């Protein structure tokens, strides 16, 4: 099923923004966990992938170190450059149903952008 809407709790949105602020000017990366109901994904928690690397223009982790976890909805990472669009590398490494890109100034939900595997924007609501 294609995800057309995403709900993120205020707590998780706040954590995404805080992690991005704390790692800036490097790029951060986290895993998004939750569930999909029909065409709606609900992000319920996040986790840090093992041996994550945060760099100036990249972030990465070894996916082979992840346990089997069917609650992983996708990946969230920051773009310190402020560009909300995914790069080709982002799309080539897409994992799960959604990708979140967090952009400066990392203040509120307007700095959280959700996309699908084709790079198209998905409606996101923080509640």
Image: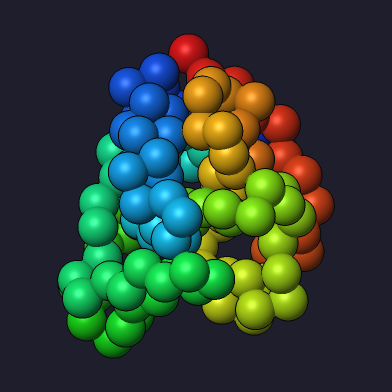
Answer whether residue 116 is visible to the viewer in this image. Answer: no
Residue in front for this viewpoint, 64 or 113: 113
Q: Position of residue 16 (x, y in %)?
A: 39, 38
Residue in front for this viewpoint, 54 or 97: 54
Q: Residue furthest top?
A: 127
Query: Splitting the image into 4 quarters, where does residue 91 fall?
Result: bottom right
The answer to whether residue 117 is left or right of residue 76 is right
Q: Position of residue 13 (x, y in %)?
A: 42, 29
Q: Position of residue 40 (x, y in %)?
A: 59, 34
Up-down: is 102 above or below 6? below
Residue found at x 64% / y 40%: 113
Q: Position of residue 85 (x, y in %)?
A: 75, 55
Up-down: is 117 above or below 93? above
Query: Splitting the image into 4 quarters, where does residue 97 fall?
Result: bottom right
Residue found at x 22% / y 81%: 65
Q: How is the image coloured?
A: rainbow
């Amino acid at each position: 099923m294609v995800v057309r809407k995403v709900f993120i709790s205020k707590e998780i949105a706040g954590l995404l923004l805080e992690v991005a602020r704390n790692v800036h000017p490097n790029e951060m990366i986290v895993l998004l966990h939750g569930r999909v109901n029909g065409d709606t994904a609900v992000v319920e928690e996040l986790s840090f992938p093992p041996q994550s690397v945060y760099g100036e223009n990249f972030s990465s982790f070894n996916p082979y170190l992840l346990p089997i976890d069917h609650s992983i909805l996708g990946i969230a990472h920051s773009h310190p450059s402020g560009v909300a669009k995914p790069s080709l590398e982002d799309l080539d490494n897409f994992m799960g149903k959604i990708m979140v890109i967090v952009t400066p100034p990392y203040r509120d939900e307007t700095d959280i952008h959700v996309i699908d595997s084709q790079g198209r924007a998905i409606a996101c609501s923080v509640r």
